[in-house]
Image (cartoon, rainbow, N blue to C red):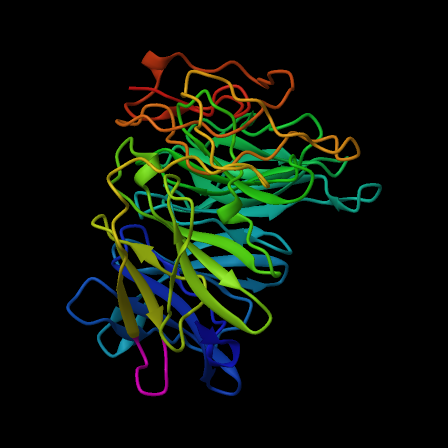
Amino acid sequence: MTARPALLPTPLTIAAGGAYAARLVAGYGDGGWCPERWTLDGPEPYTVQLPGGQPEEAGSRLQPLADGRVLIARRADGRYHFSLLYPSGPDTGELPLGAVESDGLTLLPPAPDGARVYALAPQAEDAAAGRPAGTALWMVCGGTFGPELVTVLAGECSGGAWLDAEGRLLALDRTDATGQTRAVTVDVEHGGEPTELLRISEDSNDRLLLADPDSGLLLVSSDAPGQERIGWGVLGSHRPVRFPEALHPEGGVRVTPFAAQPGQMLLPERCAVALRMTTPEAEWVAVWRPQQRELVHLPVPEGWLAGAGRWTADGQLLLPYVSASTPCGLARLNVPDPPEAPVEAAGTAGATGSSAPEPSETPEAPEVPEAQKAPPVPEAGERPEGAGTEAAAPARTPAPGPEAHPRPHPEPEDLPPAVAKPVPLQQAPLARIG
């Protein structure tokens, strides 16, 4: 655990593949900022500064590509101007890409191929709703002729997570005119209307926090249990979202998932998730797996760039940090392997250690106060459908709600291998094709 004053809030974005990262650093010129690229795939990490002709503004956006170039989005004259920066001898090379008119553009997480960059640009505000009436999705890098408009979505969109390894299906959190937020899926190759991804209950606000295409693990945030909680589901599973107690700690601890372990093909119960644990006094990292009942708490290096990190396929957690003695550091944390034996399902609050039912049985759901009008909160410990070893099923109740398909889905033969077919998670969380 590290005291908050030692943490550096400067965000660091890691490229797809993990070889490079980038951030803005202060102290360049007269109070300006400078892009800094990190190289992470060598024996020791190192940085290269990429100064331009003048200091950058603090509001400039950065995203590293897998080939080592860094995209920068500079705001000027009501537009965001995009360029690719790269080292060129003692100088910085720059390749202009074009501009997008916007007052508040947001870069989305790196696409899996490491070559494309997408961004959200809010449209004109709906005066009655007090939020943008629509959001434009742009491909600002990787196109043929500069920035390309993919689609315009109704409502205000935020978040962003890739659901497949090819980088075709993008999940976004969309807030409609009534203020309700639901995760939706966009096909970035064909554009068009989005497909609803999450509908845990009819009136719930459901956001996607993290997605791992290899294992199919999804982490969501929803108020369906009666208050905002973190839950998990699985691509291809017909079971509802579960909300384990381990992801809802007491004492005012804020939990933010920021990295999932790759390479756990079709084994979501073994996929490790790194969690940023935050209190007013301190910040640290915890690790959770769906098959575990408890979190594994880990110390973080002094000067950890909070919220930044990635997993290796063999289960090592890499955390970048900056300190007075180490201007560019990468801590490598070895996380204990999960137990081979299945974990016994956790009981509901106040329950005794009775035997859990078989997965084929539907256990009796815990009683919910009438005023909450929300489905009961299931517990951790169950292995998801498709796991190699059976485990006990937790108490859970599928949420009601009609199936919603804004547009017809393509048939499986029309999809590339291993691309998920988006359907509402309430009925069947993203049936896996291939």
Residue farthest left in this picture: 43
- Residue 283: image location, x then y, percent: 49, 68
| Residue 284 seen by the camera | yes
- Residue 405: image location, x then y, percent: 57, 17
Q: Is residue 397 above or below residue 164?
A: above
Magenta segment's dominant SS is loop
Residue farthest right in this picture: 128
Please tell me which residue lies in front, 25 or 350. 350
Q: Residue at x 59, y 41 (%)?
A: 350
Please tell me which residue lies in front, 65 or 421. 421
Which residues, given as a range, are shown in magenta? 322-328
The C terminus appears in which quarter of the rendering? top left
Quadrant hosting residue 210: top left
Please tell me which residue lies in front, 201 or 406. 201
The N terminus appears in which quarter of the rendering? bottom left
- Residue 32 in magenta stretch: no
Q: Residue at x 50, y 31 (%)?
A: 186
- Residue 243: image location, x then y, percent: 53, 38
Q: Is residue 347 above or below residue 316?
A: above
Quadrant hosting residue 339: top left
Q: Residue at x 42, y 53 (%)?
A: 295
- Residue 327 in magenta stretch: yes
On the rendered structure, is 380 left or right of 206? left
Q: Residue at x 30, y 68 (%)?
A: 38
On the rendered structure, is 253 left or right of 263? right
- Residue 13: image location, x then y, percent: 40, 60
